[in-house]
Amino acid sequence: MEKLVPMLILASASPTRKTLMERASFSFSVVPAQVDERAIEAQALEAGADGRDLAGLLAKAKAEAASKLHPDAFVIGADQTLALGTELLHKPVDREDAARQLDHLSGKTHRLHAAVA
């Protein structure tokens, strides 16, 4: 009897996460999850969550969204947040925004919270 191996899905559009999976020699598909990250963030912050909590909530939401599309697959959701104190920073929209963020972070302690679900 042939053993069936469940499909492995990375529920992320991150090129870096895809590269990490490839370097680990996993056979997988990329299915970027469609979730409203800002809505999840707003609800989480209203409930008292911090950047660490939010990273976990976003990773879980992405995994759950992809799992609904592929219920027989093993799905990995991942996300990260960048916090400067209680301020959460988002992906820069362009090079100028990236430069502003780097200037804002310069010389200050910040935290990058990563989560996998």
Image (spheres, rainbow, N blue to C red):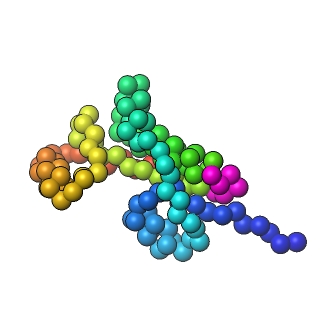
Q: Is residue 70 magenta?
A: yes
Q: Is 34 or 51 nearer to us in this picture?
A: 34
Residue for point 41% across, 31% down: 44
Residue for point 56% across, 71% down: 26
Query: What main secondary structure does the magenta stretch of the protein show?
Result: loop
Compared to residue 35, the image places residue 14 above or below, namely below
Residue for point 59% across, 71% down: 27
Asked whether residue 72 is in view, the answer is yes
> Magenta residues, as a range?
69-74
Compared to residue 45, the image places residue 13 above or below, namely below
Location of residue 82 in the rendering, given as x and y in whole percent from the top left corner: 29, 46
Q: Residue furthest right?
A: 1
Q: Is residue 85 magenta?
A: no
Compared to residue 80, the image places residue 84 above or below, namely above
Which quadrant of the view contains residue 94? bottom left
Q: Is residue 100 left or right of residue 75?
A: left
Q: Is residue 17 left or right of residue 2?
A: left
Location of residue 102 in the rendering, given as x and y in whole percent from the top left corner: 16, 53
